[in-house]
Amino acid sequence: MRADLTRDGQPFASLPCQSYFETPSSTASVLFVPFLLKPNESWSHAVGFFSAFDRQTEKTYRSCISRLKADIRQKLDAQPPGSKEWVEAEPDAVAPFMEMFTRLFNLEPGEYSVALTVTAEPGSASYSKKYRFTLFESDTVELRAQSERYKFGTFIAFDDPEVAINIPLTEDTA
């Protein structure tokens, strides 16, 4: 599976399917690998499309995440028992993530088209469908603002399902 995106008619990204959720209630995804379906079988799971970091970025990310988690854990452990106060990581532990965000963020306002392609064997069983969505300036501002929560470890050490942006996806019939 692959998702090919364009923004305002220009090629934007080609994202392979890298993970999926085994059940609707799963809180963590698992590695997506090719699989076999028999005739008349179906497969329906939430999937993650993304490009993996290059080796150096991955190495830096893993090192920095370990440091950030240790800093937050130390501060949480120092709190009185039962405390539910959020703790902030030290600015120098958060800085590498802010730099990566600044360097890699690319969800700018525009009209997006997504071609979802499922490659199968034989090739005649492959499938493709197009969708579209619009990112408005307010969506981009909201997405950028989420990086302000990095100091708490949000979206780095853990996800926050309470923070979501709903962007309608419609079938592209053109």
Image (spheres, rainbow, N blue to C red):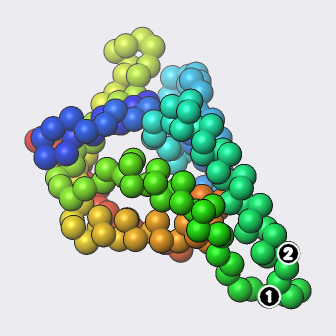
Residue 101 can be seen in this image: yes
Front in this rendered view, residue 27 or 13: 13
37 lies above or below 114: above
What amino acid is found at the position of numbered circle 2 in the picture? Answer: Asp
Mark toward the start of the polypeptide (1 vs 2): 2
Left or right: residue 92 versus residue 98 is right
State which quarter of the image contains the C terminus.
Answer: top left
Left or right: residue 96 versus residue 116 is right
Residue 155 can be seen in this image: no
Please give the name of the residue rendered at 50% of the width and 44% of the height, measured from the top-left corner: 48
Q: Which residue is mark 2?
A: 77
Which mark, by number, is residue 83? 1
Residue 171: x and y in percent read: 23, 49
Q: Secondary structure at mark 1?
A: loop
Left or right: residue 22 versus residue 8 is right
Q: CA distance from mark 1 to mark 2?
A: 10 Å
Which mark, by number, is residue 169? none
Please give the name of the residue rendered at 21% of the width and 65% of the height, measured from the top-left corner: 136
What amino acid is found at the position of numbered circle 1 in the picture? Answer: Ser
Front in this rendered view, residue 137 or 133: 137
Front in this rendered view, residue 64 or 80: 64
The mark closer to the camera, 1 or 2, is 2
Residue 129: x and y in percent read: 28, 36
Left or right: residue 39 versus residue 5 is right
Q: Secondary structure at mark 2?
A: helix
153 lies above or below 47: below
